[in-house]
Image (spheres, grey):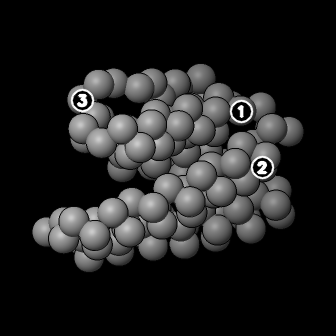
């Protein structure tokens, strides 16, 4: 089990309250994945997946509404992250917890 923690840093602020709030939750959920005991890893991954699906959808709607220049690229990143989360979730359910831990670190690095 890794003891690496992922903490909020104000450099992650984008200046939109709802997005900043969702990003703070993202960091909390990734941190939970990084420090989860084996028996808590799958529930932590499920919680992250639910958050990511909701947050990414909201963010994509806002990017579309405000014609964010890089919206297509960022939406593609979201889709790739979600595909990875679902793939790793299936592996973790079969007992491959190491890949789930690697995903947690990759999420922290990506963010």
Q: Quadrant location of residue 73?
A: bottom left
Residue 87 appears in the figure? yes
Q: Earlier in the sequence, mark 1 or mark 2?
A: 1
106 left or right of 49? left
Mark 1 or mark 3, which has the lower sequence index? 3
Name which quarter of the figure residue 75 lies in: bottom left
- Picture residue at 29% right of the left edge, 35% below the top: 12
Label 1 element class: loop
- The number of numbered badges drawn on the structure is 3
SS category of the residue bearing label 2: helix
Cα distance in 3D space between marks 1 and 3: 25 Å
Q: In this figure, which residue is indicated by the disc labeled 2?
A: 42
- State the CA–CA distance, disc 2 to disc 3: 29 Å
Q: Residue at x 47, y 29 (%)?
A: 6
Is residue 40 toward the left or the right of residue 65 in the image? right
Q: Quadrant of the N terminus?
A: top right
Judge from the rendering whether residue 9 lies leftward or rightward of residue 2; answer left or right: left
Q: Which mark is residue 11?
A: 3
The one nearer the camera, 65 or 99, is 65
Q: Quadrant of the C terminus?
A: top left
Q: Is residue 67 above or below residue 52?
A: below
Q: Secondary structure at mark 3?
A: helix
Counting residues from the start of the chain, the first of labels 2 and 3 encountered is 3
Report the front residue among 11 and 94.
11
Can you give x and y, in whole percent of width and height, for residue 62 in the image? 33, 63
Q: Position of residue 34 (x, y in %)?
A: 60, 34
Q: For this rendering, which residue is in front, 48 or 37?
A: 48
User: At 80% from the left edge and 38% from the top edge, which residue is drawn?
Assistant: 40
């Amino acid at each position: 089990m890794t003891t690496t923690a992922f903490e909020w840093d104000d450099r992650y602020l984008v200046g939109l309250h709802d997005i900043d709030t969702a990003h703070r939750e993202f960091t909390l959920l990734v941190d939970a994945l990084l420090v989860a005991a084996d028996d808590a890893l799958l529930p932590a991954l499920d919680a992250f997946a639910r958050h990511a699906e909701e947050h990414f959808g909201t963010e994509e709607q806002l990017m579309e509404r405000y014609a964010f220049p890089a919206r297509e690229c960022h939406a593609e990143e979201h889709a790739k992250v979600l595909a990875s989360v679902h793939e790793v979730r299936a592996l973790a359910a079969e007992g491959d917890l190491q890949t789930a831990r690697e995903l947690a670190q990759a999420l922290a690095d990506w963010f």
